[in-house]
């Protein structure tokens, strides 16, 4: 492991700062990097999207921020700051306390993340008890009721078991758990991928509303560019473990700088005109067998000679924007 | 003309709960035909629980209707002779949602391709059968040498799903029922798989029933569309007008809920839900409908034929003639 450069303390007004984060998985032929030198920061209240194909490293990234990478994976380097706390310096117990209280996660597939044999109110109660000491019964009931109200669930839903709730209700219950300790950052990993569009819109609106009430920042991990366009303030695009482009959402949709971003946007089928069914040529590369130079060059319609040999550096492109492409 | 497949006034109910006392209607009085002479790509869209997978399973003969009949070449499925059943197995093919579950992990993927060649005697010799398989793989954009001899776990989800399309292609069926074939596949591959389905239709005249919750891909792939809401057809017709100018308030809600890739944020407004008492005989959408009228709370709207190739089950269109029960297929066939 390379010694990381001494990090600058604090986050310059950012609520979360990720600096040179690297996650490695050991493999027979050497380590592969699921997250490779990723840096970005999140302003308070900001909604930040992380998009990419499966295997691009976006979920690994979310887990790495929470220091929840399991062996054989490991965080190989880099630093994550939550305001002025350096997460990599925290003792495991302090890190455990910071999860949920400081950074909460709404996991992918709410169906499977709730405990099937506990009532919703007890799952919320567990989370509160684990982090803040046990509440008296009445106090707990009031707290659970108000949390459920915040996510648009009736108070009696607290008495239900997960299997008695619809997918959208379960996802709301997960949001209620995520916000129960008023975290500063909420990471939502494909929170609506299993839901219908109508329910998706309702759940995302709920997430947006509680986020605004709390003043928290949100990282939305996903692959649906439409959802990103409608929800986030700024979008980061991941490819083969690297953050290849970051820009404010309006700019990135209107004029993407990275050819991969362009293809991702175009691969969303249009509702306006037929014949708009376009894929991205080729396949996402295997991390253990990345092409030399820019990892995207074999699929890139604009690739030039230098793209095949020289790995593009991440360059700043104005406020809140970066790109890693020789052609941008 | 005998339809290839016909659902005649089919109702499917499932029982659940303690002692099976709760009954859930998964599909209600549904009629539909597939004309062998006019192959079409028909999309069936709806939310989970709308009955779309039940429809697929009925069409494939995997479940039996509670009431009504599923007929193949004019005969009810249970009454088919051995030869008729064999014909049915040949000409009605399925592509399922999960490209991981349909493979037996102990067999090489060749197995799913070689079995139909053998069972349906598609080739005269082993070499001819092999050539057939290779052609089918190439037709869906796969390299036979990268696929054959592999085990399922050695291939990606997209590759596995394309093998299922290749398998359907081998059999040259009359109908492919594709139930959410791309919902577990990355956007980049979605286009390839749907494109090869569309190609099967265009080049070989295969009818396709594309079942999905994704209206945008339905619009891209299908000629006509059926929108299901809670076990019944809400709207049906040519895909272009239905998607561009939906008539049923449910279809409008569905299309308005799709987040668009646009610099315009037009997605954020939530419609407050009206609290209404709807009787069991009322319109199923009345409790959430922004345009519900008093009659919607007590009566079920039939499908009103609002144009030659469109119908909507909504009293807003009560001036249009009501389609006779079971005639939804008439608006799905364009001239």
Image (cartoon, grey):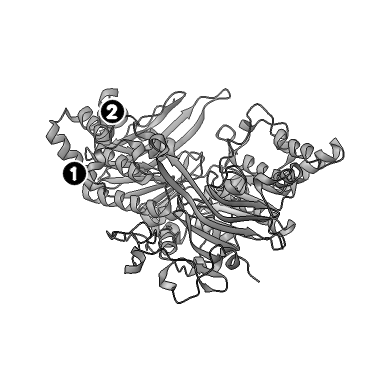
For residue B37, side relative to residue A194 (left or right)? right
In the rendered image, which quarter is residue B31 located in?
bottom right
In the rendered image, which quarter is residue B221 located in?
bottom right
Check disc 1 and report the residue beneath it: A146
Q: At which x and y percent is residue B254?
A: 43, 59
**Relative depth, front residue between A131 and A103:** A131
- Residue B245 — which label? none
Q: Give the secondary structure at mark 2.
A: helix
Q: Residue furthest right?
A: B124
Give the CA separation, mark 1 to mark 2. Answer: 27 Å
| Labels 1 & 2 near each other (Cβ < 8 A) | no
In the rendered image, which quarter is residue B124 located in?
top right
The earlier-in-sequence mark between 1 and 2 is 2
Q: Give the secondary structure at mark 1.
A: helix
Q: Residue furthest bottom?
A: B319
**Relative depth, front residue between A113 and B139:** A113
**Relative depth, front residue between A194 and A303:** A194
**Relative depth, front residue between B162 and B232:** B232
Q: At which x and y percent is residue B50?
A: 46, 52
Where does the N terminus of chain A fall, quadrant-wise?
A: top left
Q: At which x and y percent is residue A236?
A: 42, 48
Task: Estimate how packed mark 1 is, as few (under 14), some (14 to 19) or many (20 or more) residues with alpha carbons within 10 Å.
Answer: some
Does residue A29 sit above or below A251 in this rendering? above
Check disc 2 and report the residue beneath it: A95
């Amino acid at each position: 492991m390379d010694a990381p450069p001494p990090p600058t303390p604090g986050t310059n007004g950012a609520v979360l700062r990720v600096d040179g984060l690297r996650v490695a998985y050991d493999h027979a032929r050497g380590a592969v990097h699921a997250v490779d030198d990723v840096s970005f920061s999140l302003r308070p209240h900001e909604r930040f999207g992380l998009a990419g194909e499966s295997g691009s490293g976006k979920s690994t990234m979310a887990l790495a921020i929470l220091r929840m990478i399991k062996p054989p994976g490991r965080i190989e380097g880099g630093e994550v700051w939550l305001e002025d706390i350096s997460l990599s310096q925290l003792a495991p117990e302090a890190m455990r306390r910071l999860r949920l209280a400081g950074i909460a996660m709404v996991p992918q597939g709410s169906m499977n993340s709730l405990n099937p044999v506990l009532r919703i109110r007890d799952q919320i109660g567990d989370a509160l008890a684990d982090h803040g000491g046990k509440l008296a019964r009445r106090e707990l009931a009031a707290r659970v009721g108000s949390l459920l109200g915040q996510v648009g669930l009736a108070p009696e839903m607290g008495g239900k078991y997960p299997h008695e709730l619809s997918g959208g209700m379960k996802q709301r219950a997960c949001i209620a758990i995520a916000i129960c300790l008023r975290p500063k950052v909420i990471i939502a990993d494909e929170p609506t991928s299993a839901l219908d569009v109508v329910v998706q819109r309702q759940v995302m609106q709920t997430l947006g509303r509680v986020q605004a009430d709390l003043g928290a920042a949100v990282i939305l991990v996903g692959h649906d560019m439409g959802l990103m366009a409608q929800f986030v303030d700024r979008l980061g695009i991941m490819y083969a473990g690297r953050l290849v482009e970051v820009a404010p959402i309006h700019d990135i949709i209107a004029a993407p700088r990275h050819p991969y971003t362009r293809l991702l946007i175009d691969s969303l089928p249009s509702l306006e005109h037929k014949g708009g069914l376009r894929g991205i040529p080729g396949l996402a590369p295997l991390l253990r067998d990345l092409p030399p130079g820019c990892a995207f060059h074999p699929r890139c319609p604009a690739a030039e000679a230098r793209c095949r040999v020289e790995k593009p550096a991440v360059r700043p492109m104005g406020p809140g924007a970066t790109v890693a492409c020789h052609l941008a | 003309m005998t339809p290839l497949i016909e659902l005649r006034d089919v109702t499917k109910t499932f029982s659940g709960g303690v002692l099976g006392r709760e009954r859930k209607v998964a599909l209600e009085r549904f009629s539909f035909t597939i004309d062998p002479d006019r192959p079409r790509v028909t999309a069936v869209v709806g939310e989970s629980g709308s009955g779309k997978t039940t429809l697929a399973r009925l069409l494939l003969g995997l479940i039996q209707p509670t009431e009504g009949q599923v007929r193949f070449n004019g005969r009810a499925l249970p009454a088919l002779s051995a030869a008729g059943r064999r014909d049915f197995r040949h000409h009605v093919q399925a592509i399922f949602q999960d490209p991981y579950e349909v493979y037996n992990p102990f067999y090489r993927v060749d197995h799913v391709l070689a079995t139909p060649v053998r069972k349906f005697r598609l080739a005269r010799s082993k070499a001819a059968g092999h050539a057939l398989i290779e052609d089918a793989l190439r037709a869906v954009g796969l390299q036979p040498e990268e696929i054959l001899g592999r085990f399922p776990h050695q291939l990606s989800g997209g590759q596995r799903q394309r093998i299922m399309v290749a398998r359907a292609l081998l059999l040259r069926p009359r109908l492919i029922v594709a139930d959410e074939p791309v919902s577990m596949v990355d956007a980049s591959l979605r286009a390839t798989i749907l494109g090869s389905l569309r190609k099967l239709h265009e080049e070989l005249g295969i009818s396709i029933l594309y079942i999905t919750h994704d209206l945008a891909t339905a619009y891209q792939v299908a000629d006509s569309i059926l929108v299901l809401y809670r076990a019944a057809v809400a709207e049906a017709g040519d895909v272009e007008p239905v998607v561009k100018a939906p008539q049923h308030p449910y279809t409008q809600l569905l299309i308005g809920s799709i987040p668009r890739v646009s610099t315009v944020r037009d997605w954020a407004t939530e419609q407050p839900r009206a609290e209404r008492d709807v009787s069991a005989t009322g319109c199923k959408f009345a409790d959430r409908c922004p345009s519900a009228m008093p009659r919607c709370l007590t009566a079920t709207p039939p499908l009103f034929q609002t144009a030659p190739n469109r119908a909507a089950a909504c009293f807003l269109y009560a001036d249009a003639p009501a389609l006779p029960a079971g005639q939804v297929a008439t608006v799905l066939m364009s001239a």
